Image (cartoon, grey):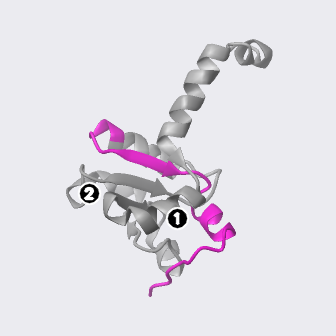
Amino acid sequence: MKKLTEITKDTEKAKEFFEHKLAFTLGPVELHRMSETEGNRIQIIDVRNSVDYHKGHIPEAISIQSSNLEYSLENLSRDKINIVYCYDQQCHLAARAAKMLAEEQFPVMELEGGFEAWKHKDYDIVVSG
């Protein structure tokens, strides 16, 4: 593996990485704005376990545990942007789910920071159960 100083000098790769990151991720502020103005063009997917989903989730989010996602593709739309989220910045369940959705030709983005970032902004949450 290249040393960190060598990797960071490759500014062309860095530019490409950040262009992709910006194209396929969004923060809670952007998601909140999209849900208010373009709610019919997005589908929010919570890939955490169902117990945590029922304790609190983003309004309009559907619960599909990451381990069940491949069996639930018929419930998703290729005509909407599927926005996935999990627990927090350290959780990779949403990134794995986004990768799988992209492989299956679904438009997809990931909410950076997950549910914790959403709560940190004091946006509404839904408690069910």
Q: Is residue 3 magenta?
A: no
Q: Please check the rendered image and state whether residue 108 is part of the magenta-colored stretch, yes or no.
A: yes
Left or right side of 85 for 67: left
User: Observer-nearest residue: 129 or 5?
Assistant: 5
Q: Secondary structure at mark 1?
A: helix
The amino acid type found where label 2 is placed reads: Leu
The residue that disc 2 covers is 76
14 to the left or right of 62: right
Q: Quadrant of residue 117?
A: bottom right
Q: Is residue 24 left or right of residue 107?
A: right
**Residue at left offset 39%, top offset 55%:** 67
Which image quarter holds the C terminus? bottom left
Judge from the rendering whether residue 14 lies leftward or rightward of residue 36; answer left or right. Answer: right
Which amino acid, mark 1? His
**Cα gap from disc 1 to disc 2, whole angstroms:** 20 Å
Extent of the magenta region = 102-129
Residue furthest to the left in view is 74
The residue located at (36%, 58%) in the rendering is 42
Point 66% across, 68% down: residue? 121
Say which mark, if any, is on residue 32. 1
Residue at x-position 61% and y-position 15%: 12
Across and down, in percent, residue 37 comes to 42, 64
